[in-house]
Amino acid sequence: MKELTRTETADFLRTHDEYCILTHRRPDGDTLGSAAALCRGLRSMGKRAFILENPEITEKYRKLHVGLTQNQCPDEATVISVDVASEKLLNPDFALLLPRLELLIDHHGSNTHFAKHGIVDAGSAACGELIYDILMELGIQMDQAMAEAVYTAIASDTGCFRYSNTTAHTLRTAAACLEAGAETYGINKSLFETNRMPRLKMEAYLAQNLEFFANGTIALALIPLEVERICAVEEDDMESISNFARNVEGVQLAVTFRTDKTGATKLSVRSAPGYNASAVCAALGGGGHVAAAGARVECDQSQAREKILKVLREQGYL
């Protein structure tokens, strides 16, 4: 992959006329907000741009993409991915487009450099922060819709600016979104202050069933599919559930286990300074950030539990 600077990325985007933007599996606010902001920015330049419809998008974020999506990627479109750390994290429906992926824009230090060109800045708290920088390089003045997309991206990946990845530049970017007209109260209310009863039932289950190790510094949260069914949670309800165990007093590293539709186990690891979530997940073929990472293992949760305990022992956490 040819690595680009912000200026070079802006030059690349000026060069082409039509763009198809890809987001990752189980899309969150960062990948969806980044895609929406970039798409709107390119359109403001007179480019033809759209986001390839992600079948896993949830109702919480669907309004971000109204009027921006298509179901197919034309042959003449230049393909871009945003906030995608690895080709494995693309929706399987997008796999056929990998040979055409010209540019990736990402902030994960574990990025596998799977596009022909790319900009990866692990110092950006969210991909949306990097998208904002690129929009500024392009000389684009954000409108309200663009600003709200960028704000959604950075607020999502910083836990509303509570996480250790938040920097002064992150806060300056958020301020620029407010100045451009972003209605941040409604976004924050939706993302961080509104829970349906199924989510509260799930949290009650976790509070009763967390496993603790190493004098309470390590916590495991196994969530069987049957429990998801009993609680009647939807995917929106499960957003940020990985933070639940980490937020328990004394916990420095937490692992949350969920089963996907194939029967494999998805691991989400969250850690405090001094612990490395990315290294834990890398040992199982995953990756991410030092404080937040993930992996997918082809086994049930019981077997995945043994695998993660083995990794934690090998890395000196147990």
Image (tube, rainbow, N blue to C red):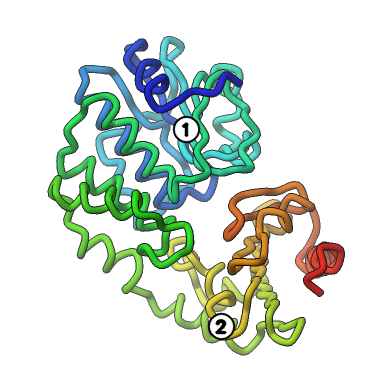
Please state the horizontal and vertical placement of residue 221, each as a whole percent of the image. Answer: 66, 75
User: Residue visible at 71% across and 82% down?
Assistant: 211
Estimate the spatial distance between the alpha carbons at disc 2 and disc 1, rounded to whole Å: 34 Å
Q: Residue at x 29, y 31 (%)?
A: 135
| Furthest residue toward bottom | 208
Disc 1 crowd rating (10 Å Cα; few below 14, some 14-19, many 20+) is: many
Q: Quadrant of the C terminus?
A: bottom right
In the displayed structure, would residue 180 be above or below residue 225? Answer: above
Give, as a three-letter code, the residue at label 1: Ile
Element type at mark 1: strand
Residue 272, image x, y percentages: 59, 69
Residue 71 picture quarter: top left
Instruction: Say whether residue 145 is left or right of residue 305.
Output: left
Residue 13 at x, y percent in the picture: 36, 19
Q: Residues within 10 Å of mark 2 (few under 14, many from 20)?
A: some
Vertical position of residue 6 compared to residue 47: above or below: below
Q: Which residue is mark 2?
A: 248
**Residue 276 image-quadrant placement:** bottom right
Q: Residue at x 27, y 52 (%)?
A: 174
Residue 54 location, quadrant: top left
Q: Is residue 165 above or below residue 64?
A: below
Q: Which residue is mark 1?
A: 105
Could you say whether the residue bearing mark 2 is in a helix, strand or loop?
Answer: loop
Viewer-proximal residue among 96 and 285: 285
Lower sequence index among marks 2 and 1: 1
Asked if the residues shown at circle 2 and circle 1 are in contact, with their CB atoms under 8 angstroms apart, the answer is no
Q: Quarter holding the N terminus?
A: top right
Left or right position of 215 against 3: right
Left or right relative to 118: residue 95: right
Q: In the rendering, at what x and y percent does residue 68 appear? A: 29, 33
